[in-house]
Image (cartoon, coloured by chain):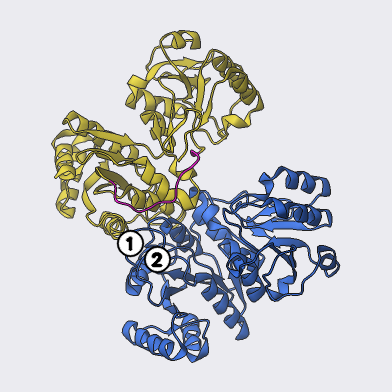
Chain colours: A yellow, B blue
Amino acid sequence: MTMQSGRFDLGTLILPRPYLLFLGDATERGFAKTALGLADWAPDLCIGEYGLPGCTVTAGLPRLTPAEAREKGARALVIGVANVGGVIPDQWMDALVDALEQGFDLVSGMHAKLVSFPRLAQVAAQTGRQLIDIRTPPQGIPIATGRKRSGKRLLTVGTDCALGKKYTALAIADAFKARGIDADFRASGQTGIMIAGSGMPMDCVISDFLAGAAEILSPDAPPEHWDVIEGQGSLFHPAYATVSLGLLHGSQPDVFVVCHEVGRTQILGVNGYTLPSIPQVIEQTIAMGRLTNSAIRCAGISLNSSSLDDAAATVEIERLSAELGYPVADPIRRGPAFDRLLDACLS
Amino acid sequence: MTMQSGRFDLGTLILPRPYLLFLGDATERGFAKTALGLADWAPDLCIGEYGLPGCTVTAGLPRLTPAEAREKGARALVIGVANVGGVIPDQWMDALVDALEQGFDLVSGMHAKLVSFPRLAQVAAQTGRQLIDIRTPPQGIPIATGRKRSGKRLLTVGTDCALGKKYTALAIADAFKARGIDADFRASGQTGIMIAGSGMPMDCVISDFLAGAAEILSPDAPPEHWDVIEGQGSLFHPAYATVSLGLLHGSQPDVFVVCHEVGRTQILGVNGYTLPSIPQVIEQTIAMGRLTNSAIRCAGISLNSSSLDDAAATVEIERLSAELGYPVADPIRRGPAFDRLLDACLS
């Protein structure tokens, strides 16, 4: 475990805060998903937003120049917009250089690395600012020890990728805190890390260190403290199951919540893979997870029911709960079903 | 998938051959494990050995100067000796520089990268030679597709690390060939790659690409061709299960052989982890492996019985076979038990 230029603490990634969200020249909300998610989930971290001429998208935050945002205390300019191809277009470059010169660190979750742009690297060196590529994992991640850590842990797992594991973990961590429970959301992916201001980009870690990375993501804590850990992938995804397993073994969760989306029948992004059933996910998660925590248990199901109206969602949630014998809730709809899921997590 | 300076073919690592084995100034055989393994398993690839003054270890090969070895056709100087700390000691440096100047590429599986030594990097650039760090994975590894590939595949799995998965795969591939079967050993670790002359250093691959790396390690092949794939780690190892799972999913084996060592009761290198039973390993390997190959089956057990004499090994092999209902054999002792294991693999 190493400390490195203020970016790292015990091996996890720590971002300078608060943020000014950079929207580039975006004209479609779909490309500004990162900014919209940050404004939703981390409003306290977001001082404002900054768009170039031509930008028509807003995250609903005050529109500020970099100079105004600096005055209000912003420390990092977060690239909150994706570009086709994941690269930094030429028309953003002057604005990014200007931000460095005004004292901002730059934060990016894009595939293209900030440090790979010579002009940014040069200006960052001259100004002493940081270029933080969230897809670059911290140095000094140890090999996992398998040692049981103190404190309690909840992990969100899934029947597939991209159906609500981050959202569910955020909602549960928030609800735990609202009940007066000492809890932390632990981010394991790019957007989650920006929301939390720290975390571990699990999908970028070298294989041998994957479970070790999950171990340092949720360190020893007081006995009644809960780490609510953002899951990744699925044990049933032929490309990403390894990341899911490293997170499961290293997180050694006491409790897991299975995330599923109404109507999803095929694994995303691969051909010919049928979605596992929820009972299959529960069984396999327990079978693999008990290696590092013999007391692992399923608390219930987080159902992404965004394709249904309220009445249909309520029917489906009750039907599934009766079928499976577990609490089922949609964390976006909340209500009594979500309270029952939280009770089951804590019981 | 990329081609890069002759080192890479379809994303796997390809080494220049044949080798001159560098023994440094080693005085203990234990530090020369790589050279000894290469001389044992790849004698056709090894032109000779080269020790510095003071070296008292031999791999049993002709002792040659680099100039003599070049005349006999050697193309790569392989660092066949480990140093405490995994670094290149100063007293080796002149010899390595001299080898580059005489036209050798350098090959290393050490943790310290050859390319990180400025003097080596400079001479390699001047002479146009390659510095090949086997622990640096090839560029351009794709995300796994999960697509079923043609040809047949066997994977060795284990109750733990370091108990015979590489040796078993080598022995089975050799025995298949001796029976006239079209077969290839596929290496997934440093020493295996040196033995095979190509392969994929699975433990160094970025997590997201792990199953994809295993997919390109055993590409489409004729229907009756067998790839015999070196396993890594164990699904029951709290640090390395992820590498095992990526290899299992990406290899999509038709057949697996469980490797176990007589008397091993605790997982190596971690505290408090009991070895799984062989039936547990069979069950979990099938449960996870059927995701990418629904026909996966266990052919039998490879038992490392090196702690027993011949008579005791025979008794233990028969006892275990009766207990488990699978063929059991020690690939080092061979004999009829090994033939029965091969029959079960091919049946």
Q: Say which residue label 2 marks.
A: B290
Residue A342 image point, x, y percent:
17, 40
Closer to the chain start, of discs 2 and 1, is 1
Same chain for mark 2 and mark 1? The answer is yes
Label 1 is placed on what type of residue? Tyr
- Residue A45 sits in which quadrant? top left
- Residue drawn at 34 percent across, 21 percent down: A43
Q: Which residues are magenta?
A: A137-149
Residue B201 image point, x, y percent:
57, 58
Label 2 is placed on what type of residue? Arg
Membership of A142 in magenta stretch: yes
Calculate the distance from the C-alpha at mark 2 to the C-alpha at mark 1.
26 Å
Does residue A123 appear to the left or right of B210 in the view shown?
right
- Badge 2 element: loop
- Badge 1 element: loop
Q: Say which residue label 1 marks.
A: B273
At label 1, counting other C-alpha atoms closer than 10 Å, the crowd grade (few under 14, some 14-19, many 20 or more) is some
Q: Is residue B71 above or below residue B302?
A: above
Does residue A289 appear to the left or right of A89 in the view shown?
left
Does residue B124 appear to the left or right of B264 in the view shown?
right
Q: Main secondary structure of the magenta part?
A: loop
Question: What chain does badge 2 belong to?
Answer: B
At label 2, counting other C-alpha atoms closer than 10 Å, the crowd grade (few under 14, some 14-19, many 20 or more) is some
Residue A289 image point, x, y percent:
30, 55
Does residue B200 appear to the left or right of B61 in the view shown?
left
